[in-house]
Amino acid sequence: MPRLITRHPVTDTMTPHKVFIGIGSNIGDRLHHLQEAVDRVSLLENTAVVKVSHVYMTEPVGEAGQNRFYNGVVLLDTALAPEELRRQCKIIEQELGRPETYPRWSPRVIDLDILLYDDLVISTPALTIPHPELHCRKFVLLPMLDIANPLYPATGENTLQLLDRCIDRSVLIRVRESIRV
């Protein structure tokens, strides 16, 4: 049964939590940006990168006329609370060249999204977990299946079940086995 949190979740800082992070880039050296992001996430306090999916070239969502994205998913063990992990991901994005504010679906050097955090369901003004579009984004579901088949706490379905009924019909092209851990 998922745990619903509507305010600030309390997490045990000593217990690692399983977290899936979506990574993406469509500006400049996309593979380099993904690798840099994974390297920096691995340096976060009380955090270890467990697995990284293959990297896929995907069609952009939203704004037309931009480069294709390179996307993947990273599995972490972390003792960071969800809000702190989000804050650290935003810092990494900015350090790698992403502006603090940006239009939705615009081109980006790097994008780090918390997809799942254990079985938590969080809804705060700053953070929604599971990621609200996870279930309808093939560029997230397929890479996630490379490394695990976690349950989607909002419905109790696993990732393969979500992919089977996903309405996203975009084409994903595997461009690399995976990013170094």
Image (spheres, helix red, strand yellow):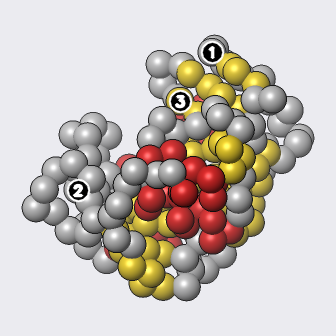
Q: Residues within 10 Å of mark 3 (few under 14, many from 20)?
A: some
SS for callout 2: loop
Q: Residue furthest left?
A: 65
Q: Residue furthest front?
A: 165
> In this image, 43 relative to 68: left or right?
right
Instruction: Give the residue type at disc 2.
Output: Pro
Q: Earlier in the sequence, mark 3 or mark 2?
A: 2
Q: Nearer the viewer, mark 3 or mark 2?
A: 3
Q: Position of residue 19 (x, y in %)?
A: 69, 49
According to the image, label 1 marks what residue? 6
Instruction: Give the residue type at disc 3.
Output: Thr
According to the image, label 2 marks what residue? 107
Find residue 147 and report its image quarter: bottom right
According to the image, label 3 marks what residue? 128
Q: Residues within 10 Å of mark 2 (few under 14, many from 20)?
A: many
Q: Which mark is residue 96?
A: none
Q: Earlier in the sequence, mark 1 or mark 2?
A: 1
